Image (cartoon, helix red, strand yellow):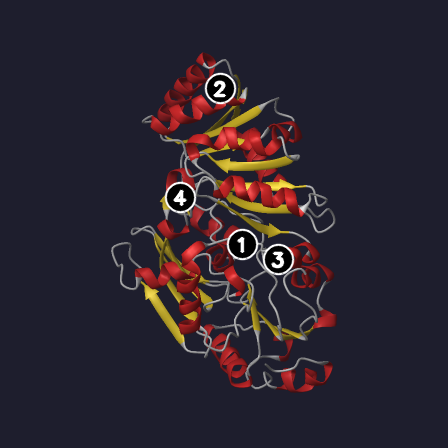
Amino acid sequence: MNTFCNADRPSLASSFQSILDISAIQAWETLEPTLQSRISQAIAPPNPIDLVYPNTQDELAAVITCAHQNHWRILPCGNASKLHWGGLAEGIQLVVSTARLNRLLDHAVGDLTVTAEAGMRLVDLQAILAQQGQFLAIDPAYPESATLGGIVATADTGSWRQRYGGIRDLLIGISFVRSDGKVARAGGRVVKNVAGYDLMKLFIGSYGTLGIISQVTFRLYPLPPNSQTLLLTGETQAIAKVSTALRMSVLTPTAIDLLPPQTITALSVGEGMGLLIRVQGIPVSVETQLDHLLQIGQNAGLKSDRFTETDEATLWQRLRERMISSLHSPTITCKIGIVPSTAAETLAQIATLTAIEGCIHASSGIGTLRFDSATSIQTLLTIRKICQSQGGFLTVLEASPVLKKQLDVWGDVNNSLDVMKKIKQQFDPGNLLSPCRFVGGI
């Protein structure tokens, strides 16, 4: 492995001067403090010397080709909003950002598909799509800064997965730059084109370890004309009963989220366990479903609160903000998976071990839990054991680098690790892309 030191600075920067504009090459000490902090939380020391911003896919390919020839280890990112998720990358010598690859390439309004560069922010894409009455059904963390490529790389869907599925259900095409600088593609630009579908799936949740995503194509949906949210709060058993009834019903909410008592208290919307249900569609359908939901909640002895228009948007925004940590008030954030039929009881069990805030998608059992930064490693391991006993998982997303060095942030993946290592070897034989950031030190 190439040894990284300050003496490398002139050669590293000068290597890209024939490829990139000088403004696209930034030395470590010139980066804004927030970006420095995000990167520092993502890597093991020493810090990288340069960050480069290619403007086109061809420039990105040229940068990666140069890095490959010099055996430089690379940490890819978009806006770095979720760069601190996952394991600590090791031996990094260069950070490559796709933030300037942010153009809309094609919006097939009639086909309900869109193709854009990976560095485009989701918030900017949604504003463009809304002009045609459409939207991308993704509700990720850090929505104001998250890029499309970063959302795919971290498989960060959000609450809308209840109705629209995960990233793999929405992504229909991808272009990426391989570790040797070659551009490759999978999928297509129409929903029925499934060529390369399995290859495309590999990049969802790969955390930049297989290649650098440069372009993405998604299927879209019409913007719902009406949206309302119902919050049911009360005893755990009653919430569990209603959650099961909803999963078995013919109702079509776009989101059903279980919220532990501490989250309900933090949002100042009630007491006890909560079930947050969002219904969207034509007004008559929304009203009919909400009336039925209110009756179900009343029969279960639950308190109900209805949110519409600005109040509804504010509630979902506040919940989203509760699920992410501030650089100034760090916490431990974990992604978990548990059995949907026992999700409410499992949340209650975890709450007896330590104070938690969280949001669990009721139909999939996948969600986010936040713990105080002082939570012990043993407590985290106990909660992981609870999840794994159900065939689920607990992955540490956000935590201090010190804590991440003390435990396996990904947990046991059983016999799939050998397959993952073989895939990594095929895509990145030199181990240059996000080394050690993924499962099993991949």
Q: Secondary structure at mark 3?
A: loop
How crowded pointer 1 is (Cα within 10 Å; few <14, some 14-19, many 20+) is rated as many
From the image, tell me which residue sits under label 4. 133
Inter-mark Cα distance, 4 to 1: 39 Å
Instruction: Tell me if residue 319 comes above or below residue 35 in the rendering.
Output: above
Quadrant of the frame with the N terminus? bottom right
Inter-mark Cα distance, 4 to 3: 34 Å
Q: Is residue 219 visible?
A: no
Which one is in front in this view, the residue at disc 1 or the one at disc 2? Answer: 1
Which one is in front in this view, the residue at disc 4 or the one at disc 1? Answer: 1
Inter-mark Cα distance, 2 to 4: 38 Å
In this image, 126 relative to 35: left or right?
Answer: left
Specify which label sits upstream in the sequence, 2 or 3: 3
Q: What kind of residue is marked 1?
A: Trp
From the image, tell me which residue sits under label 1. 410
The residue closer to the viewer here, 323 or 60, is 323
The residue located at (49%, 73%) in the rendering is: 56
Inter-mark Cα distance, 2 to 3: 37 Å
Specify which label sits upstream in the sequence, 1 or 2: 2
**Residue 275: percent from left, percent from top:** 50, 27
Q: Secondary structure at mark 2?
A: helix
From the image, tell me which residue sits under label 2. 238
Q: Secondary structure at mark 4?
A: loop
Inter-mark Cα distance, 1 to 3: 14 Å
How crowded pointer 3 is (Cα within 10 Å; few <14, some 14-19, many 20+) is rated as many
**Residue 187: percent from left, percent from top:** 31, 62
From the image, tell me which residue sits under label 3. 84
Pointer 4 with pointer 1, Cβ within 8 A = no
Specify which label sits upstream in the sequence, 4 or 1: 4
Specify which label sits upstream in the sequence, 4 or 3: 3
Specify which label sits upstream in the sequence, 1 or 3: 3
Pointer 2 with pointer 3, Cβ within 8 A = no
